[in-house]
């Protein structure tokens, strides 16, 4: 990526964990990232890199004053969508029945962010770029390749996201994936959505981030050796071979080796 993402496109993902260094070590060994605890003026936020380009963020769970939250926030990867105006997007979310988790705020000169919950409770972020557009590498091994919502009400969620973000929703045209909904920006699929029927009872609505890998099975095995849990063992699906894992601190993510040519379309 050498420029801005089209509004409505997932552009970043980050993780809040109790043990930041342990998470940095885990993802370094699993996905080849580089990263270290950031400066105090940035709350220690770590921008992880791949081939010298930013790919994800990892931060320690703490309050703005540096104290430990009680209760602790959920350990989860957050998907961020690029938007033109974070505050306006938060207002549109509220009008569509969503909730604001973190009010729109400036992040130095990097941009402006907000964290929102959709009308069904799925949490996601929005990013209004300043000097930082988002991930510098996507759609190749070690980087984010897909973002997917699991929700209790796909029709309601579709109406919400079409009202809040500049995207459209509709059924996929991929053979063998009937019932799956795609989120599109300028007619290009940028994310997906499905119901919670295939998840364990009681699973709340949530966004799942997928990372591209060269070999799903070997990455799954390496994750287990490093203390991760397998939630969905490696399996074949219409677009590739994937697995769903939880890292040693409980953050859930997916890995996938796609069947597509590695030269993916530019997501702008």
Image (tube, rainbow, N blue to C red):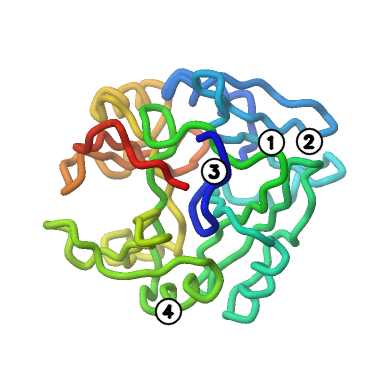
Disc 2 from disc 1: Cα separation: 8 Å
Q: Which of 68 and 195 is in front in this view?
A: 195
Q: Which of marks 3 and 1 is nearer the N terminus?
A: 3
Task: Verify CB contact (< 8 Å) between mark 2 and mark 1.
Answer: yes
Disc 2 from disc 4: Cα separation: 36 Å
Disc number placed over residue 43 in the picture, else none: 2
Residue 199 placement (x, y as % from top left): 31, 59
Disc 1 from disc 4: Cα separation: 33 Å
Q: Which residue lies under the disc numbered 3?
A: 13
Q: How crowded is mark 3: few (under 14 residues within 10 Å), some or many (20 or more)?
A: many
Residue 56 placement (x, y as % from top left): 55, 35
Disc 3 from disc 1: Cα separation: 15 Å
Task: Verify CB contact (< 8 Å) between mark 2 and mark 3.
Answer: no
Q: Which of marks 2 and 1 is nearer the N terminus?
A: 2
Q: How crowded is mark 1: few (under 14 residues within 10 Å), some or many (20 or more)?
A: many
Residue 260 placement (x, y as % from top left): 22, 38
Q: How crowded is mark 2: few (under 14 residues within 10 Å), some or many (20 or more)?
A: some
Disc number placed over residue 60 in the picture, else none: 1
Instruction: Specify the quadrant of the image occupied by residue 22.
Output: top right
Q: Which residue lies under the disc numbered 4?
A: 156
Residue 211 shown left or right of residue 176 in the figure: right
Disc 4 from disc 3: Cα separation: 24 Å
């Amino acid at each position: 990526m050498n420029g801005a993402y089209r509004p409505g496109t997932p552009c970043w993902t980050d993780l809040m964990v109790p043990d930041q260094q342990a998470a940095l070590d885990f993802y370094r060994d699993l996905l080849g990232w580089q990263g270290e605890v950031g400066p105090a003026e940035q709350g220690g936020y770590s921008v992880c890199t791949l081939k010298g380009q930013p790919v994800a963020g990892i931060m320690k769970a703490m309050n703005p004053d540096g104290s430990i939250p009680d209760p602790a926030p959920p350990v989860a990867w957050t998907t961020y969508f690029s938007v033109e105006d974070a505050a306006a997007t938060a207002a549109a979310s509220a009008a569509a029945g969503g909730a604001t988790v973190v009010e729109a705020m400036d992040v130095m000169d990097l941009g402006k962010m907000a964290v929102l919950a959709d009308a069904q409770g799925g949490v996601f972020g929005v990013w209004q770029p300043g000097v930082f557009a988002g991930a510098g590498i996507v759609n190749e091994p070690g980087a984010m390749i897909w973002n997917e919502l699991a929700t209790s009400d796909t029709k309601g969620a579709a109406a919400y996201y079409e009202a809040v973000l500049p995207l459209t929703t509709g059924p996929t045209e991929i053979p063998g994936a009937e019932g799956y909904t795609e989120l599109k920006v300028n007619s290009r699929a940028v994310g997906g959505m499905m119901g919670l029927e295939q998840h364990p009872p009681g699973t709340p609505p949530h966004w799942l981030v997928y990372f591209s890998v060269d070999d799903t099975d070997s990455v799954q095995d390496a994750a287990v050796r490093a203390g991760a849990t397998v939630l969905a063992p490696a399996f074949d699906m219409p677009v590739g071979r994937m697995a769903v894992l939880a890292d040693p601190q409980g953050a859930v993510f997916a890995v996938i080796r796609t069947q597509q040519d590695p030269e993916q379309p530019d997501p702008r």
